[in-house]
Image: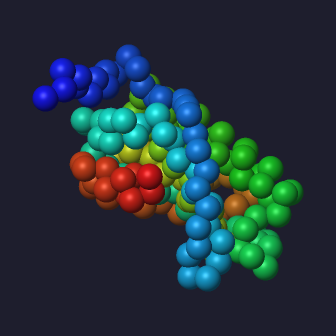
Amino acid sequence: MWPFKKKAQSAKDLPIARPWTVAEGEYKGKPMFVRINDGYRRFMVIPGYGHQVGIAVPLNEPEPSGLPSSAENGELDLIEDAICNALETAKESLFVAVITTSGMREFVFYTQAPAQVKLKFEQLKAGIASHPIQLMIRPDEDWDVYARLT
C-alpha cells in the first residue's frame, strides 16, 4: 500500500483559482466547450460544499453553431466576473466549471450556503442588464456533476 494519502482540503486553501483546462465535445449535434477548474480534481469532493449551483445565461445572438460571438463573449466575461465576485465571497461557493453550448453558457459552482446563493442571485439578476440569468441549486454532496465534466 502506498504511504501517500490525498491531502484534505482546508478552508484556508479555498477557493482554488487554477489550473483550468478546456475540453471540446458535442451536445445534441452542436459544439460544446467545457472549461474545468482542474484544481479540484485531486480532491473530487470538498466536504461542506454539498450543493451544486448552475447559473445559466441564454445567449442573445448565438452564432449558427450555438456559440457566442466574440462581442457577446466579452459581455459573458463581465457576467462571469460579477457572478464569481458575488458567490465566492467568504468562501461560500467554489467555481468549478463553465459549459458553453447550444445557445447558452452555464457557470457551475458548489456551495455551502444555498440560501445565500439565492439572495445573491436576485441581486445579480437585478444588476445584469445585458442578459437574463437563471438559477438552479440541487444537493450533490458527491460532486457528481463535476465528476461527469472531468
Which residue does the image show at 84% across and 57% down from the upper left?
70
Picture colour scheme: rainbow
- In this view, the residue farthest toward the right is 71
Q: Can residue 121 be seen here?
A: no
| 38 in relation to 99, above or below | above
Q: Can residue 140 be seen here?
A: yes
Which residue does the image show at 52% across and 56% down from the upper left?
55
| 53 in relation to 29, above or below | above
Judge by depth and name the residue closer to the eye, 14 or 51: 14
Q: Quadrant of residue 34?
A: bottom right
Relative placement, left or right, of 148 versus 17 is left
Judge by depth and name the residue closer to the eye, 117 or 101: 101
Q: Quadrant of residue 63?
A: bottom right
| 76 in relation to 61, above or below | above
In the rendering, at what x and y percent does residue 77 appear?
Answer: 72, 46
In the rendering, at what x and y percent does residue 24 appear?
Answer: 61, 61
Judge by depth and name the residue closer to the eye, 48 or 21: 21
Q: Where is the N terminus found, in terms of image quarters?
A: top left
In the rendering, at what x and y percent does residue 20 appear?
Answer: 58, 40
| 70 in relation to 94, above or below | below
Q: Quadrant of residue 94?
A: top left
- In this view, the residue farthest toward the front is 1
Judge by depth and name the residue closer to the eye, 38 or 103: 38
- In this view, the residue farthest toward the top is 12
Which residue does the image show at 24% across and 35% down from the upper left?
47
The mark total stands at 0
Relative placement, left or right, of 52 versus 29 is left
Which residue does the image show at 23% across and 23% down from the upper left?
4
In the rendering, at what x and y percent does residue 105 appear?
Answer: 62, 61
